[in-house]
Image (cartoon, rainbow, N blue to C red):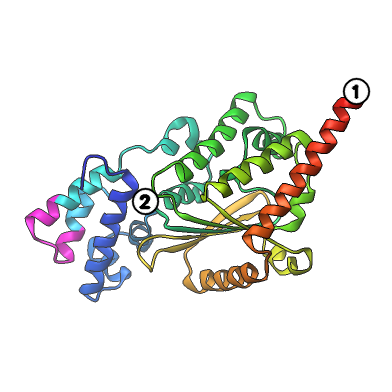
Amino acid sequence: MTAQDPPAVARRRVRLALRHARQRRKLTQQQVADALEWSLSKVQRIESGDVSISPTDLRAALALLGVVDPRRVAQLIEDAKASRRQRWWTTAEYREHLSPAMLQLLQFESEATAIRVFQATLIPGVLQTRAYASWIQHFWAGDIPHADMKVRVELRTRRGESLFEVPDPPKYLLILDESVLHREVGGAEVFAEQLEYLLERIRQERVTVRFVPFSDAVKLVMLGSFTILELPDEEDVFLYQEEGWGDSMHHSLATIHRYREIFEQAWEASFPPDVSARLIESCVLRLRTLLDRQRHSA
């Protein structure tokens, strides 16, 4: 560990060390929970990265799992302390606006090597401009205080910066329903700026976008918007879903595998990235032409 390691990296080292030590001892999560007098959910949440573990609890777990080398124990204890450092989204300013599932999503985004996203109706939050995000928040959140609205928009902006403005961003694959191009969220000016920003991210090779044609989108739209996050360890894959007014995080490998298969099928059936980029460019041109005509006729 180095002093520069972010909490997410330190937390990942701890949870993988615990998981691998448990597997070497051929113990189930329930057996570990019983031996330590913890709940099963506590063991599961520590191993999945949902929560951090205190140094005291870590010492007890390592002793049970046969990790006794003093240097190794000391390294993991330091990692446990580092993993509990506050991250930007856990500050009071933001935390009250985040659901438990969104808190997990932010944690996993910070560790992910690949992110696969399907959005049926809107540009994803991490790729939204402030104006586009503000319009959506006004539409969905109703009459919440202006200060709260501002924080929610800032959250989306910071998520995008944290995900893409880093030296080694995750591979981000995005499937959008073709109907997104015909839904002028916020009006022509706001939507044109949003599409131009999306094109900028594509040209920076931060995002790969494909549009699924109207004719092939039915199955995906019925599933709703979802995100599949892959972390460095092949066992670490998570499914985040937005469902109406709520959201949820899923850990079931069977469920995730099904969504991954559907995503891959849709990816192959979608317009290629170059064609998809041209669709965006064409939409921007149409909107800019419309706006120019409106200005000249005013």
Comes first in the chain, label 2 or label 1: 2
Residue 69 sits inside the magenta stretch: yes
Identify residue type, mark 1. Answer: Ala
Q: Quadrant of residue 293?
A: top right
The residue that label 1 is drawn on is: 298
The residue that label 2 is drawn on is: 51
Most foreground residue, 159 or 57: 159
Q: Kindly identify which numbered label has been placed on residue 30.
A: none
Residue 125 lies, with reference to residue 293, above or below; the image says: below
Of helix, strand and loop, which mostly describes the magenta segment?
helix
Q: Residues within 10 Å of mark 1 (few under 14, many from 20)?
A: few
Most foreground residue, 264 or 6: 264
Identify residue type, mark 2. Answer: Val
Residue 54 lies, with reference to residue 152, above or below; the image says: below
Marks 2 & 1, CB-CB < 8 Å contact = no
Q: Residues within 10 Å of mark 2 (few under 14, many from 20)?
A: some
Residue 185 sits inside the magenta stretch: no
